[in-house]
Image (cartoon, rainbow, N blue to C red):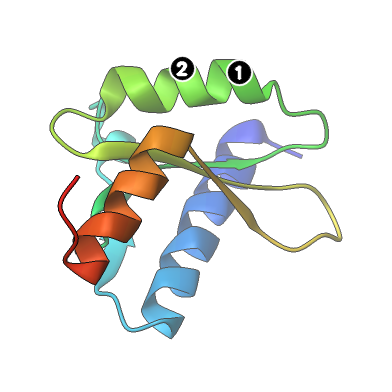
Amino acid sequence: MNSRAKGKRAELSARDILRLHGYTARRGVQYNGCADAPDVISDFPWHIEAKHVEKLNIWAALQQAEKECGTKRPCLFFKRNRSEWYIAFRAADILKERREVQGESA
């Protein structure tokens, strides 16, 4: 399968997951040649890197998300064939987010 088509499907699937949970989301603009665009543009408060691969190098994918996240916190949506989606966050980021949502001070 063409890896570009598979990447596009991963981005569209991640977009659909966000929409299912009430976020507005659309595919990023990397198809226009902007490599640093998020895979999914959304009101979800994290920079999204989406991967659909059988053998994910999770460290490289997380590094890519961190490099491209700008002012947002990075996260990685990932799956392999015939599996459900997973999301990876940095521990410090998700714990800080939890405190912010609960209105606690850091």
Query: 51 or 102, which lies in front?
Result: 102
Picture coordinates of residue 33, whole percent (x, y): 26, 27
- Asked whether residue 27 is in view, the answer is no
Expressed as whole percent of the image width and height from the top left, the position of residue 104 reads: 19, 60
Which quadrant would residue 102 be assigned to in this image? bottom left
Please say whether residue 26 is visible from this viewpoint: yes
Residue 57 pos. (x, y %)? 69, 20
Q: Which mark is residue 90?
A: none
Quadrant of the rendering where the C terminus is positioned:
top left
Give percent across and percent down for residue 73: 28, 38
The answer to whether residue 54 is above or below residue 99 is above
Amino acid type, mark 1: Trp
- Tell me the amino acid under the disc marked 2: Gln
Residue shown at 45% from the left, 83% from the top:
20
Q: Specify whether 39 is left or right of 6.
A: left
Q: How many labels sit on residues?
A: 2
Give the residue at mark 1: 59
Q: Is residue 57 left or right of residue 98?
A: right
Q: Which quarter of the image is occupied by the N terminus?
A: top right
What residue is drawn where x is 25% and y is 34%?
37
Q: Is residue 69 above or below residue 18?
A: above
Q: Where on the picture, by quarter, is residue 49?
A: top left
Note whether 26 is above or below 30 in the view shown.
below
Q: Residues within 10 Å of mark 1 (few under 14, many from 20)?
A: few
Q: Secondary structure at mark 1?
A: helix
In the depicted structure, whether residue 66 falls above or below residue 82: above
Please report the residue visible at 20 percent of the width from the left and 58 percent of the height from the top: 100
Q: Residue lying at the far front in this picture: please name it.
A: 105
Q: Are marks 2 and 1 in contact (CB under 8 Å)?
A: yes
- Identify residue for label 2: 63
